[in-house]
Amino acid sequence: MERLYDQSSYEKEFTASVTGCREGKGGRWEVTLDRTAFFPEGGGQPYDTGILGEARVLEVHEKEGDVVHYTDRPLTVGEKVTGRIDWERRFDNMQGHSGEHIITGCIHNRFGYDNVGFHMGKEEITIDFNGVISPEDLDEIELEANQVIYRDLPIQVIVPSPEELSQMEYRSKKELTGDVRIAVIPGVDVCACCGTHVASTGEVGLIKVLGMIHYKGGVRISLLCGRRALLYVRNRQNQVAELSVLLAAKQDEVCAAVVRLKEEKERLEMELSRLRQAEAEAKAGAFPAQGGALAVFEEMEPVQLRKYCTMLYEGGKGEIVLACARKGDGYLYVLGSASHDMRALSKKLNACLNGKGGGSSLMAQGTFLADEGEIKRAFAQCAGEELE
């Protein structure tokens, strides 16, 4: 099979003869040709898609030394067909793959680290290196990589003779035999590569590093290249512009405005907590001291409800106290007592009221899927039995 993508990455349309077609899995057909411009998945680069005759090419993979096109309908063996590459997808992959070579070359030249993993995903490109890079150094690498783009250096793909190859210094993740395809960016990178590339570094357009994490003793860098990088930067710029309007702050002062907003939120939350505490104390103080069981229903947050229950039973407002607050179709509950074991009472109430929860001898908490009337009746009965 003649692999046209090895000769030129810019072959968008071609004609070929169908050499094989058999039904595969999932209603797909496996088609082989005498020549193809469709790149099969390999070297971290995704496969091409497009059109082959009247069929859609859904995936392309290398199988037993042949390039297999997975189509949505069969083609007739021996017929001549026209193939059309999904150029937007192909060029996106070309920008990404060439961008990876640029940034990997910059890192290898500066630190001597090897690229030990590479993946071009739907959302981002990831590259793994076998050494640690600081955030400051990564910022410099990003600038250096984009300067390589500005220089618009040619990207050459060559297949040197065995003698020539033996004299070359090039990057490779594994031992290679036979013809070895080498991608060369002068002064930046020389690497064994089976993928498709743009003609010059300028066509990459932009490299934007998204982040870095520690990974297997080295680092994993995520980035975008070309059109994807531009759309990412545009999206982030639009978000900053919207935040600038919402915060009534200049775009370069958005972070400071968010910090002020966060500090104000924390101050208001502390003030709200103080006021809720005072409200709970006032409500608890309004109840007369009494024995027996006390059930109260309030609009409170869980933390406030627990404190409220504690105030009531510690203040002698009830020997056993049940404090409830509405939650969805049921109620949050807190059971408290200084003299009775709340674990056993909680189990009884859970059984009666489709409840869940538990706790300690002093306090139990959980939820009931019941209405206020059902809760009051069940509590009066179960707490009454506990107090007998």
Image: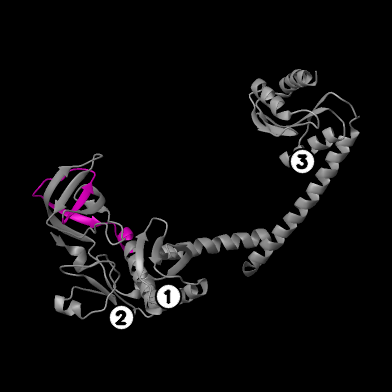
* Quadrant of the image containing the C terminus: top right
- Which is nearer the eye, 383 or 22? 383
Identify the coloring: one colour
* Residue 347 appears in the rendering: yes
Q: Which residues are magenta?
A: 65-91
Mark 1 or mark 3: which is in front? Answer: 3
* Image quadrant in which you'd find residue 202: bottom left
Image spot of residue 290 (x, y percent): 89, 26
Mark 1 is on which residue type?
Asn
Residue lying at 33% horizontally and 69% vertically, measured from the top left = 98
Q: Residue furthest left?
A: 78
- Element type at mark 3: helix
Residue lying at 68% horizontally and 62% vertically, measured from the top left = 259
Mark pair 2, 3: CA separation? 68 Å
* Quadrant of the image containing the N terminus: bottom left
Instruction: Name the mark on residue 292.
Output: none
Q: Is residue 159 left or right of residue 206?
A: left
- Which is nearer the eye, 224 or 270? 270
Image spot of residue 64 (x, y percent): 16, 53
Instruction: Name the mark on residue 304.
Output: 3
Mark 2 is on which residue type?
Pro
The mark that comes first in sequence, 2 or 3, is: 2
Residues at discs 2 and 3 in contact (Cβ within 8 Å): no
Residues at discs 1 and 2 in contact (Cβ within 8 Å): no
The mark that comes first in sequence, 1 or 3, is: 1
Residue to which mark 1 is pinned: 146
Dot 3 crowding, Cα within 10 Å, few <14, some 14–19, many 20+: some
* Image quadrant in which you'd find residue 335: top right
Image spot of residue 48 (x, y percent): 27, 56
Residue to which mark 2 is pinned: 186
Above-or-below relation of 210 to 23: below
Residues at discs 1 and 3 in contact (Cβ within 8 Å): no
